[in-house]
Amino acid sequence: MAEVSIRDLRNRGGDIVERAERGERLTITRAGTPVAELSGLPTAPVPREVLIERRRNLPAVDPERLRRDLDALIDPSV
């Protein structure tokens, strides 16, 4: 868990909150002593109906073309 001083939290609060929002857990310190933890809130699950509707709107995937595109991007020796 990363440590963030109260001074950093005050000066760069937006950046630090974004880190927590992305899933990083942060320990807030005062004079080097841990005093609090900061973490993002869990996100609400997406309802099944919404996921099904999103799936309907996805473009079709041509597996052969996808394979060619991936082969062109990835070093085959890896």
Image: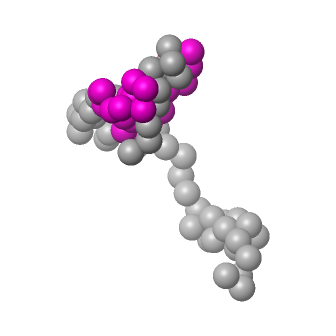
Q: Is residue 45 left or right of residue 24?
A: left
Image coordinates of residue 69 in percent, x first then y, are 70, 65
Q: In this view, does 59 lie to the left or right of 48?
A: right
Image coordinates of residue 66 in percent, x first then y, are 63, 65
Residues 20 and 8: in front is 8
Could you tell me which residue is drawn at 55 percent across and 57 percent down?
A: 61
Seen as rendered, the residue at the extreme front is 31
Please, is residue 25 above or below residue 40 in the view?
A: below
Residues 37 and 68: in front is 37
Marker count (numbered): 0
Magenta stretch?
A: 11-37
Image coordinates of residue 17 in percent, x first then y, are 45, 24
Question: Residue 36: which quarter of the image?
Answer: top left
Image quadrant in which the N terminus is located: top left
Could you tell me which residue is drawn at 45 percent across and 20 percent down?
A: 6
Could you tell me which residue is drawn at 39 percent across and 28 percent down?
A: 29
Image coordinates of residue 8 in percent, x first then y, are 53, 22
Whether residue 23 is visible here, answered yes or no, is no
Could you tell me which residue is drawn at 74 percent across and 67 percent down?
A: 73
Please, is residue 14 above or below residue 66 in the view?
A: above
Residues 48 and 53: in front is 48
**Is 78 contained in the magenta span?**
no
